Amino acid sequence: MTDITSRRDPHAPGVPGVPAISLRGATKRFATKDGSAFTAIRDVTLDVAPGEFVAVVGPTGCGKSTTLSLVSGLEPASVGTVEVAGQPVEGIPDGVGYMFQADAVLPWKNVLDNVALGLRYRGLRRADAEARARDWINRVGLGGFEDRYPHQLSGGMRKRVAMAQTLITEPTVLLLDEPFGALDVQTRELMQDELLTLWSGSGAACVFVTHDLTEAISLADRVVVMTAGPATVKDVVTVDLPRPRRVEEIRLTPEFIQLYKRIWDSLREEVEITRARGASRVA
Amino acid sequence: MSLDTQTRPTAEPQQVPAPSPTFRLFRSRASRRRSTVALVRVLLIVVWLASWELAARTVIDPFYYSMPSQIWDRLVDWFTEGTSMGSIWSNMAVTLEEAVLGFVIGTFAGVVLGIVLGRARFLSDVLAPFIKGANAIPRIVLASLFVIWFGLGMSSKVATAFVLVFFAVFFNSFQGAREVDKVLVDNARILGASRWAMMRTVILPSATSWILASMHVAFGFALIGAIVGEFTGADQGLGLLINHAQGNFDAAGIYAGMLIVTVLALGAEWLITRLEQRLTSWRPPSGSELARDL
């Protein structure tokens, strides 16, 4: 188990000594259409300290995203406990932000209204919400695009809107489900840098799900390797690369490459299992 | 003049946004095509009306089939002298009021119930067979019942229009509420949306295109409901006028009434299209709309 106090960011919000996220033996089963149970994740135990950035990697479709659903309260755990800031998760916990893989901004609202959405839901007056939204729009580099609708923006710009929409609520727990998966490589690297910059001041605990190992190591303090589905924690690797990081540069350092090899060794088996299953299904 | 729609490459493609010679040529070609289309349409109407008129004066019996000049005379008569049932304007106003009331109430009820049931799975599972059963009833027959219940006045027609409109709108808004993107709902939940805020900012806007699509059909239904209601028993309205014309073997009167109803329906259709454009301005222009803009 990780020593929470030593990794703790001194400026991070939350209760000292209490992990921001705590999963204990969490298992999630879904009922399939034919009535049988499908196990997405089994017996996942993981702590994330306040202010810590954890990346979760695993083979495609292994159930990584389900872990985030449990933490966010979108889905209840079938077995085990899930706690956010020491409180068991029932419904959506306070202070949770979630960036989805798919476009989740409302297509019928312009950039300003989309970014202000979380504050409006929380009952803030329109003028105040819009003032803060404008500030966030500038911080994600979309100044001047306040009146545009999502379909008038590029994929990268829509991700910026989603990022501002999530971060404006000042989450203490930030969940990211392959948020940049659909972007081209250059835009993705730009967005990764952007995310690190915005996160570094916030002190939020981050869980970033991805199947891109480079992305995981560039961003995270720890990389969690999941097994082939039903997923459970296979390996946890600490990434002690210095911050602040520039993702384009850090991936060329020898330390990075060493970490990459170390984690890939662990991940490769699982990827191969998944591939073999896929092949047998096709055959 | 030709109907040739192909645009041949007339010059090198140019990147200038201002009207370049190529663009102007393209536009003049497009506008020429538009006026050709309009001209051919007018020509079709002229040919149709002229052949009808000619046939009625020579071969067929205008007593049964009437003819354009008679219909025109009847319209002029109605609008200048008034009808046997009073002023044409007041008759139009009555029918329109019945249709609009039935349309508004029916649309409102259809949207509210459709969206609520669309999001409440238990309730919709319970009510599904009843709703399907109610939809299978030949509802136009209810007009007779409504005359007994509500009398010859306006309310029985509003009720007939309502039952026709309600189901058309209900099924579409139900479907629309069901098909909301789950990611949008999850995202709004995480951002802290209450049930009501979720309905207002996510479910309803998402279902809007479904609802608007049904509203085009629904206004037609509302007019049918009002007119059939007037057929069944009324003291005023276009349906009564048409029914009266039928009683007098006045084919021209039936045609004239039909024509007025058609114009009303087209006017309403135009208004609904405008509303649709306003409410869906956030949407990217679809392929067909882009094509029309050319």
Image (cartoon, coloured by chain):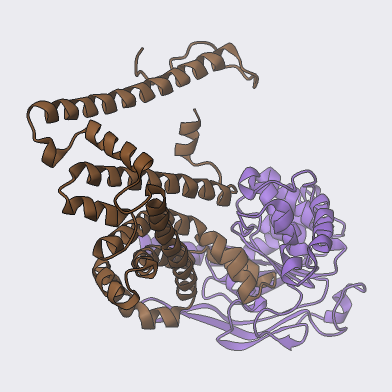
Quadrant the N terminus of chain B occupies: top left
Q: Give chain A's shade.
A: purple
Q: Give chain B's shade.
A: brown
In-image side of A221 versus B116 (left or right): right
Across and down, in percent, residue B140 comes to: 26, 66
Q: Where A21 falls versus A224 (above or below)?
A: below
Residue lying furthest left: B59
When asked about the image quadrant of residue B205, the answer is bottom right
Which residue shows up at 44% across the image and 17% down it?
A: B32
Using the rendered image of the protein, determine whether residue A59 is visible from the camera's viewpoint.
no
Which residue is at the front of the view, A229 or A142? Answer: A142
Q: Where A39 falls versus A250 (above or below)?
A: below
Across and down, in percent, residue A263 comes to: 67, 64
Which residue shows up at 62% across the image and 74% down it?
A: B196
Which residue is at the front of the view, B6 or B65? Answer: B65
Q: Where A261 falls versus A151 (above or below)?
A: below
Residue lying furthest right: A10
When asked about the image quadrant of residue A178, the answer is bottom right
Q: Where B258 falls versus A206 (above or below)?
A: above
